[in-house]
Image: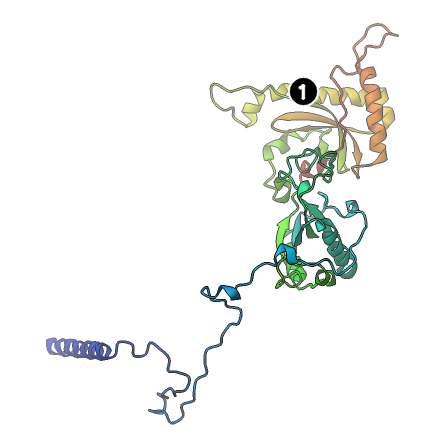
């Protein structure tokens, strides 16, 4: 047994020595392929009898060497950019501006810069809509949220503002930049399918527009994006708060509202202060010790008082209550559209009745008023899509 192990060790040592000696004589053997004009040995036949010449490796013509700067593609100088070869559309821009109702997942097709950026973007939008039946919109830099420092730009604007609404001097101030966004997708998967479709499009209008980068063709550089007017919590909603759902199980809860919109007429909140002894627990026990209990009771009492008032019953609109972790709200009415004419009439009636409902009835003596809480109808309807559980 020992002799067998000794012979095996000697054979391994001899093989290693032979290999090292061979590589020492020719250390680059086998590391490089033979030139194209030479033949490679055919090991299957023990020689080069059936060997075939190997061709040269393929060369990519788009590869540019760093040493030759003349071959590097550079943007067209500004003084050499030609005028548009097509007639630019003169339609109004406003109907094609992006609103918060589009998307939220979209595709950024092309960005235009220059004095005629809006007209360039409009030409592309019209072709995408008419020729390819794609929902295309224009987003200007001065309308972009958090980029213009202008109020009344969603999503930081009031809920009723669906697009950027600028006044003077912001309305005439421009940054000469406009982007074209495509799509009305509700999921990431849908936007990915749309992206592949948009990348294959080669609009005819782009051939007649000046190019800063002349080698770009069509919309191959399109990328996925989201509607900047839609808040992030609406694009990627988290899990519903089970604690808030338990607080809204009463018969007059807003969860029972059949419409998508309702009119807020009151808002009650707990006191705001620093908790010296630590953070308050957000459980059922903590809720009983919270100032929000008073706010919830005030909202429920106001809703019950309004539901019993003859003036409110004549309007034919139900009264609802919504509780969350910071406040309790009272709402009235159920509507399917944010600009429902019935909602406008309801708000006018609530403004007229607000003072009447809290005044004592003087005809039958000084008795308690129908309600004793302030009623302040909101200027826009509340969207219940993000409030009600799905």
Q: Which one is in front, 69 or 130?
A: 69
Q: Which residue is drawn at the image coordinates 72% and 52% (left, top)?
A: 121
Is residue 39 found left or right of 159 in the rendered image?
left
Residue 110 rendering spot, x and y as whole percentages? 66, 55
Task: Using the rendered image of the protein, determine whether residue 379 is visible from the camera's viewpoint.
Answer: yes
Tell me the quarter of the picture where residue 140 sits. top right
Residue occupying the far top of the picture? 365
Q: Which one is in front, 134 or 329?
A: 134
Is residue 176 found left or right of 131 in the rendered image?
left
Task: Using the rendered image of the protein, determine whether residue 185 is visible from the camera's viewpoint.
Answer: no
Tell me the quarter of the picture where residue 359 sits. top right
* Callout 1: SS: helix
Residue occupying the far front of the picture? 79
Residue 97 rendering spot, x and y as whole percentages? 74, 46
Q: Which one is in front, 39 or 194?
A: 39
Residue 375 rendering spot, x and y as whole percentages? 76, 20
Q: Which colour assignment does the render follow? A: rainbow
Tell me the quarter of the picture where residue 223 sits. bottom right
Relative to 140, is 357 above or below? above
Residue 119 rendering spot, x and y as whole percentages? 75, 51
Q: Which residue is drawn at the image coordinates 61% and 20% (left, top)?
A: 270
Is residue 285 found left or right of 218 in the rendered image?
left
Relative to 219, is 282 above or below? above
Relative to 228, is 272 above or below? above
Q: How many labels does the image show?
A: 1
> Badge 1, how many Cα within 10 Å: few under 14, some, many 20+?
few
| Tag 1 residue | 297
What quarter of the picture does the C terminus occupy? top right
């Amino acid at each position: 047994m020992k002799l067998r192990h000794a012979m095996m060790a000697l054979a391994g040592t001899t093989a290693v020595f032979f290999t090292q000696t061979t590589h020492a004589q020719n250390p680059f053997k086998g590391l490089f392929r033979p030139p194209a004009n030479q033949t490679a040995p055919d090991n299957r036949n023990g020689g080069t009898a059936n060997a075939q010449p190997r061709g040269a490796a393929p060369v990519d013509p788009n590869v540019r060497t760093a040493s030759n700067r003349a071959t590097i593609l550079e943007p067209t100088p500004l003084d050499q950019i030609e005028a548009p070869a097509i007639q630019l559309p003169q339609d109004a821009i406003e109907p094609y501006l992006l609103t918060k109702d589009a998307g939220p997942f979209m595709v950024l097709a092309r960005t235009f810069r220059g004095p005629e950026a809006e007209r360039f973007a409009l030409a592309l939008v019209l072709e995408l809509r008419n020729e390819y039946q794609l929902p295309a919109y224009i987003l200007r830099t001065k309308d972009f949220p958090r980029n213009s420092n202008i109020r009344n730009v969603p999503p930081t604007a009031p809920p009723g503002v669906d697009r950027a609404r600028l006044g003077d001097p912001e309305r005439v101030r421009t940054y000469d930049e406009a982007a074209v966004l495509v799509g009305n997708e509700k999921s990431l998967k849908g936007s990915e399918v749309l992206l592949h479709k948009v990348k294959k499009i080669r609009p005819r209008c782009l051939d007649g527009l000046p190019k800063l980068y002349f080698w770009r063709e069509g919309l191959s550089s399109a990328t996925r994006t989201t509607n900047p007017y839609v808040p992030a919590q609406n694009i990627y909603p988290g899990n519903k708060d089970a604690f808030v759902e338990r607080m809204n199980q009463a018969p007059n809860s807003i969860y029972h509202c059949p419409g998508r919109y309702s009119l807020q007429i009151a808002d009650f909140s707990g006191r705001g202060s620093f908790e010296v002894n630590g953070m308050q627990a957000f459980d059922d026990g903590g809720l009983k010790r919270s100032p929000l209990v008073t706010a919830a009771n005030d909202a429920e009492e106001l809703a019950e008082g309004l539901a019993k008032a003859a003036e409110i019953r004549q309007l034919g609109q139900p009264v609802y209550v919504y509780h969350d972790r910071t406040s309790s709200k009272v709402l009235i009415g159920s509507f399917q559209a944010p600009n429902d004419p019935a909602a406008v009439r309801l708000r006018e009636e609530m403004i007229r009745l607000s003072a009447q409902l809290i005044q004592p009835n003087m005809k039958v003596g000084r008795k308690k008023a129908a309600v004793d809480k302030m009623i302040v109808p909101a200027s826009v309807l509340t969207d219940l899509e993000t409030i009600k559980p799905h």
